[in-house]
Image: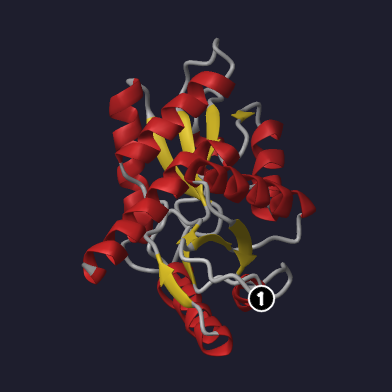
Amino acid sequence: MMHTETPALIGIAHGSRNPAAAVATESLVAKAGAILGVEAHAAYLEDFASPSIPEVAGALADHGYSSAIAVPLLFTEAYHATEDAPSELRDATLAHGLDLVQADVIGTGEDLVDVLETHLAGTEDQSARGEIVLLAVGSSRPGANETVESLATALAKRTGRDVRARFATCAPRLNDRLEAANTPGTVLPLFTAPGLLLDKARERAKGAGWQVLAHLGDALAPTVAARYETALEAISARED
């Protein structure tokens, strides 16, 4: 069995019962892997989606890999990024002997503002100049939702439009804004892939006359690749 020195890429997603979510996630991870020129696989945190992180680690070990860099396909440092993913990576290391390094999450920095601005320009009805609702899942972790609100502020400065953060699972909720707005606007999902939460939000918003854009999907591939490269540089610096 050949020993492979270049770490593989594992894209860690939450997972969804919507079959389209896995298709979109695998496409995103594959495109990030193609940018990097490395083996790339998606893995899921929830039991209802597969493969899991340990399953992917086992498959990589069977193919001669000794290490992988795992990029959480998440926008905030909430529970999945700080608890679930590290725990599963530790379990996978113990089970399969791989050196598994967790990279930074996708985050809400300037590179994501670039992605959102491009996504708006490429998919929004060009006659739309109303407000934008940046829709995220939401978190109970202190500080996580505030980073999404800061992202909305940064996007507002970039576009010159009114941008408000709203959440699918906690306040302030999307429905509140749909009811309060004087005129319909555009919902910009901060989602990597389709899912049941986004499906429900899309139905409500469209029923209120709002335009709802697609999930970000493959547009995030360069950002995911950049998180891998940053982690790889940190590994190399420690080894020097």
Q: In which quarter of the image is residue 124?
A: top right
Position of 74 relative to 63 (above/below): above
Relative placement, left or right, of 125 versus 223 is: right
The location of residue 105, given as percent across then percent down, is 41, 57
Residue at 42% x, 51% y is 106
Question: Looking at the figure, which quarter contains the N terminus?
Answer: bottom right
Instruction: Name the one closer to the observer, 71 or 37.
Output: 37
* Numbered circles on residues, count: 1
Instruction: Name the outermost residue toward the front.
Output: 2
Q: Residues within 10 Å of mark 1 (few under 14, many from 20)?
A: few
Q: Is residue 106 visible?
A: yes
Judged from the image, the secondary structure of the residue bearing numbered disc 1 is helix
Q: Describe residue 48's horizontal placement relative to residue 44 as left or right.
A: right
User: Looking at the image, which is closer to me, 77 or 2?
Assistant: 2
The residue that label 1 is drawn on is 62
Q: Nearer the viewer, residue 122 or 2?
A: 2
Q: Position of residue 62 (x, y in %)?
A: 66, 76
What residue lies at 75% left-to-right and 48% top-to-bottom? 20
Where's the C terminus, which quadrant?
bottom left
Q: Compared to 199, does 232 lie above or below? A: below
Residue at the image position 31 percent from the left and 44 percent from the top = 109
- Tell me residue 128's x, y (percent): 53, 15
